Image (tube, rainbow, N blue to C red):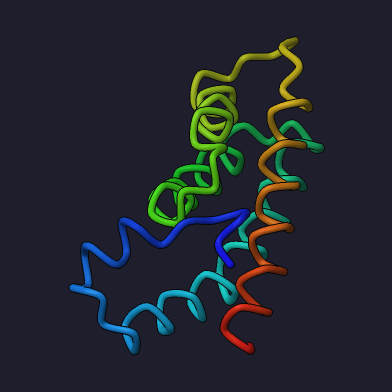
Amino acid sequence: MEINYKLDKIRDLSDNDQEFIETLATTFLEEVPADARLLKIAVDSADHLATYKAAHKMKPTIDMFELGVLNELIEVQDWGKLEKRGEDISEQLAKVMDAVEKASSEIKEDFNL
């Protein structure tokens, strides 16, 4: 239904190839929730390098599926990259985690996965 994610960029990229779109949806479900869990663990343990790596890996997919939290994810990434000790990014992380969870549930339902 595309409430918590959008397929516009993917449709443009794939010339609306449904098989390709389904493959990307499957890949999203296989990778993004797991990466988000790693991101949360990294932030919770103040592991700046792991935070940076996890956020950086997630960025293209979050952008492609238009979850609406790219800016928040970049803030989390920068917190890790720049080792911003003492800065609280829990609000940004919570928004990213919530968006990933909602999009994952919706993609599962929309693609019968």
Quadrant of the image for the N terminus? bottom right
Give me the residue at 34% from left, 89% from top.
19
Give me the residue at 60% from left, 30% from top.
76
- Place of residue 14 in the rendered image (x, y in percent of width and height, measured from the top left): 22, 72
- Place of residue 9 in the rendered image (x, y in percent of width and height, measured from the top left): 31, 56
Quadrant position of residue 88: top right
- Place of residue 24 in the rendered image (x, y in percent of width and height, measured from the top left): 41, 75
* Numbered circles on residues, count: 0
On the rendered structure, is 69 left or right of 23?
right
From this view, report whether residue 3 is shown above or below residue 89: below
Q: Nearer the viewer, residue 109 or 95?
A: 109
The outermost residue toward the top is 86
Quadrant of the image for the C terminus? bottom right
Quadrant position of residue 75: top right
Q: Nearer the viewer, residue 20 or 2?
A: 2
Give me the residue at 62% from left, 54% from top.
4
The outermost residue toward the front is 1
On the rendered structure, is 8 left or right of 12?
right
From this view, report whether residue 4 is shown above or below residue 26: above
Give me the residue at 54% from left, 40% from top.
68
From this view, report whether residue 9 is shown above or below residue 109: above
From this view, report whether residue 63 is shown above or below residue 109: above
Q: Nearer the viewer, residue 88 or 97?
A: 97
Q: Nearer the viewer, residue 38 or 97?
A: 97
